[in-house]
Image: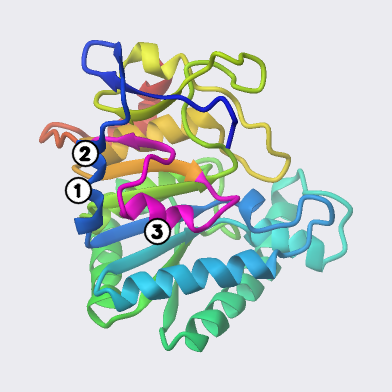
């Protein structure tokens, strides 16, 4: 967290207002169906490329506690390729599609084994769900994915979702798990999406450079001015930058899901967010009946 952190609200009409929108945040404690997305850079030690078991264990413990509060929780987890290339002894993240898919094939099984073992330690079961983009472009596959996820939740099982990197190609890949997590939220009618990342939230400018940059605590509407604030990713491990998170927010909020971006460096932020604390950037939902998720992604309107 930056020492000069100041929070404001981005109101409808592109106007900044002082304050953290405490009225909106106070409602977060009542969320019942929560999707949590964590990226590769939050699961892997940057210095070595090895799995950060301490962070994984804490994430599972917090999610298990949410489950014990009678909340439905779904985890969207990156990391298969990162875990795989380390396991194979490769010096860096692979660049060719074939090698990426080979690493994913090795890493996905290992990562899921770790998740299942950790969740079992807290008396919860986890199930692997792998998706590709064509799951939402096909009515039948979308329905099947929705039914599977909802059935798992009804059985008290925690779905662990990732893109199926082993078979994904440019034509059928999401490309980032920010988008995937928003899709999952829309499939199961989640009321909260938490994006855990390596940043504190959306700022009016780069806080590393501009000491007067202010954190935007609450966003009531996403417009072109807000989109222009999006910056590229500075992580060498992850694939999504701020632009993908704004795109995810467009999907989530337009289908009726509140979304928050917060820093994964302290996983207690998950609990703090749901207790209404002023952490990260909260995007307020405003469900639109005419919003077409598939069309939005295909045409990449978030870049316009």
Residue 62 is left or right of residue 293, and the answer is right
Please tell me whether residue 154 is drawn above or below residue 63 in the rendered image.
below
Q: Is residue 19 magenta?
A: no
Q: Is residue 82 left or right of residue 249?
A: right
Q: Nearer the viewer, residue 243 or 84?
A: 243
Give the residue at x 55% y 50%.
264
Q: Residue at x 10, y 35 (%)?
A: 289
Quadrant location, the N terminus: top right
Where are the magenta residues, as a range?
263-284
Report if residue 264 lies within the magenta region. yes
Q: Look at the numbered discs 2 and 3 and tell me whether their residues touch, using CB distance below 8 Å.
A: no
Q: Position of residue 51 (x, y in %)?
A: 72, 65
Find out whether the residues at labels 2 and 1 contact each other: C-beta distance under 8 Å.
Answer: yes
List x then y, in percent, for residue 57: 58, 72
Q: Is residue 284 above or below residue 155?
A: above
* Residue 27: mark: 1
The residue wearing badge 3 is 271
Q: Is residue 23 visible?
A: yes
Q: Quadrant of the C terminus?
A: top left
Q: CA distance from mark 2 to mark 3?
A: 16 Å
């Amino acid at each position: 967290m930056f020492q000069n952190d100041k929070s404001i609200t981005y109101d409808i009409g592109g106007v900044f207002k002082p304050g953290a929108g405490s009225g909106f945040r106070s409602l977060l404690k009542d969320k019942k169906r929560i999707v949590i997305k964590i990226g590769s850079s939050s699961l892997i030690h940057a210095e070595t490329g090895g799995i950060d078991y301490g962070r994984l264990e804490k994430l599972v413990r917090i999610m298990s506690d949410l489950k014990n509060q009678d909340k439905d929780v779904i985890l969207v987890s990156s990391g298969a390729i990162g875990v795989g290339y380390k396991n194979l002894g490769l010096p860096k993240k692979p660049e060719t599609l074939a090698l990426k898919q080979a690493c994913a094939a090795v890493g996905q099984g290992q990562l899921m084994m770790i998740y299942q073992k950790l969740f079992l330690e807290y008396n919860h079961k986890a199930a692997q769900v792998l998706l590709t983009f064509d799951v939402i472009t096909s009515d039948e596959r979308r329905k099947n994915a929705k039914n599977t996820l909802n059935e798992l939740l009804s059985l008290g099982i925690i779905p662990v979702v990732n893109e199926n990197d082993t078979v994904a190609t440019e034509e059928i890949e999401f490309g980032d798990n920010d988008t995937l997590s928003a899709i999952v939220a829309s499939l199961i009618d989640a009321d909260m999406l938490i994006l855990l990342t390596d940043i504190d939230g959306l700022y009016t400018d780069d806080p590393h450079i501009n000491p007067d940059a202010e954190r935007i605590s609450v966003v009531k509407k996403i417009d072109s001015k807000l989109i222009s604030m999006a910056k590229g990713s500075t992580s060498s491990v992850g694939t999504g930058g701020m632009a993908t998170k704004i795109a995810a927010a467009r999907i989530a909020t337009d289908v009726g899901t509140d979304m928050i971006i917060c820093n994964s460096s302290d996983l207690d932020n998950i609990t703090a967010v749901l207790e209404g604390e002023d952490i990260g950037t909260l995007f307020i939902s405003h469900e639109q009946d005419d919003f077409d998720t598939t069309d939005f992604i295909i045409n990449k309107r978030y870049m316009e």
